[in-house]
Amino acid sequence: MMSNLFKVENGKLVKAQARALSKESLIEEWVANDPGLLGLDAVIIGRQVSTDHGKYIDLLALDRTGGLIAIELKKDRTPRDIVAQVLDYGSWIRTLVTPQIYEMAERYHQKRLTIVFQDHFGERIPERLNGSHSMLIVASELDPASRRIVEYLSEEHGVSINTAFFNVFETDGQEWLTTNFLLDQSEVEERYERKVRPPWSGYLFVNAGLNENRSWEDYKQYGFVAAGGGEFYSKSLDQLSVGDNVFVYDKGNGYIGHGIVTSEKAIGSEFQTPDGPLFDQPLEHPGLMHDSDDPTLAEYVVGIEWKKVFDPAQAKTFKGIFANPHIVCKLRDPATIDFLLEEFEVESPSDSVLDS
C-alpha cells in the first residue's frame, strides 16, 4: 500500500520520490519511543520480549483497556514468515496473566506499572490486564498473498491483526515519513469485539480530543464535536450518522456529555451554527481553524444536540470505566452503559437499536 507525497512549490506540485529506509531498525526505535506513530494510544512494556517458544517479540505494548499489542517489524524476513510469526506470538500472549505483565513491564521501565500507566493515560490501570490482545505487523510493503491472509483472518474470523506501512519520501535533500494501515484499525477492533464482547448498546463512544485547538466550551455553545490533524483521525467521524446517540469522553477525566447527532461530518470551515458559519463565531480556541485550506489536515466537525453536559472537573467516571483511544467506537461494556444512563439521566434504548 504505497502513498504519494507532493510538495507545493511556486504553485506547482513536485512529487517526492519514495525510497527505502536506510536502516529498518530505526523504525523499531521510533515506535518504541512513540507508539503514536502507528496511531496507537499505548505504552510500550517490553522490547525483544522472549516467548516460551524461543522467539522474540520486537515490541509489546499495553493499551488503555489493559489489552496487549504485539508489534513486529518485517525486517529481512519473507512476508509469509512474518504473518506466521506474529500469529505464534498471539498464541503465547493470550496465556499471559496480570502478574506476569506487571513483572515484564516493571523490568522494562524500572518503575511500577501503575505509575507508568497513570503517567501515560492519566487514569488508573485496570485491575485485570490482557482481557484482549492484538497483533500489528510493521512493514514497508507486504506481498499480495500475505495481505490476503491478514484480510481473511480479520474479516472472516475476527482476529485482531493488521499491518502498518512506513513509507519514506525524499525531495531536495529532505525526507518525510508517512504511515498508513492495510485495514481500517477501528473496523478490525469492531470485528474482534463482536466475537468476544457483549452486544452493542445502541450508543456510541466519542473521544472529545480536547487540546489547544479544541474547546469543550466551543463544543457546547455551537453544538459539535471535532477531529482533525490528519485523515487517520478525521475519517473516524464518518461513523456518526444523524440520530445517533453519543457519549463524549474527555481523556484522563471521564464522560462529559451526552447528545444526538444532528448533522454528519463536514469540514469545519463549512459547518453552520444557528448563528452562521462556525469559523465566523468568537471561538474560545481559534486554533480549531488550523489548516482550514488543507482538506487532509483540517478539522472536521459533526453537529450535536446536547442533552446533558458536565464540565471536565465534574466528569463522570469510575475505576475500570470503558475508554478507547479511537475517536469513535461502539459502547458495549454493560457496567459503563448502566452508569452513563443513570448519570446522564437517559432512558434505556429500545430493543430495535440493539444488534449482535
Image (cartoon, rainbow, N blue to C red):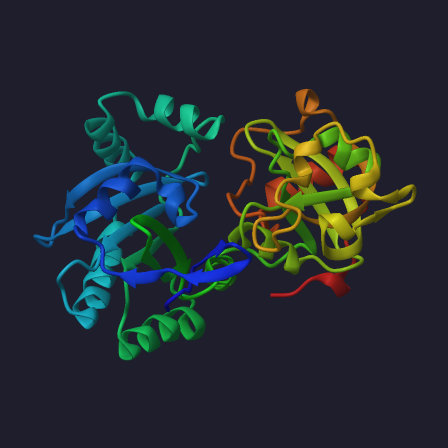
* Residue displayed at 63% across by 33% down: 213
Residue situated furthest left in the rendering: 54
Q: Position of residue 42 (x, y in %)?
A: 39, 40
Residue situated furthest right in the rendering: 275
Residue situated furthest front in the rendering: 10
Q: Position of residue 172 (x, y in %)?
A: 33, 52
Residue 26 lies, with reference to residue 345, above or below; the image says below
* Residue displayed at 19% across by 52% down: 24
- For the residue pair 186 and 289, the one nearer the viewer reads as 289
Residue 123 lies, with reference to residue 59, above or below; the image says above
Q: Position of residue 210 (x, y in %)?
A: 62, 33
- In the figure, residue 277 lies in which quadrant? top right
235 vs 174, left or right, is: right
200 vs 326, left or right, is: right
* Residue displayed at 38% across by 49% down: 38
Report whether residue 67 is seen: no
198 vs 351, left or right, is: left
The quarter in which the N terminus is drawn is bottom left
- For the residue pair 162 and 31, the one nearer the viewer reads as 31
Q: Position of residue 273 (x, y in %)?
A: 86, 45
Exactly how many numbered labels are in the figure? 0
Report whether residue 340 is seen: yes
- For the residue pair 221 and 201, the one nearer the viewer reads as 221
- For the residue pair 1 and 15, the one nearer the viewer reads as 15
- In the figure, residue 81 lies in which quadrant? bottom left
* Residue displayed at 77% across by 31% down: 283
8 vs 329, left or right, is: left
The quarter in which the C terminus is drawn is bottom right
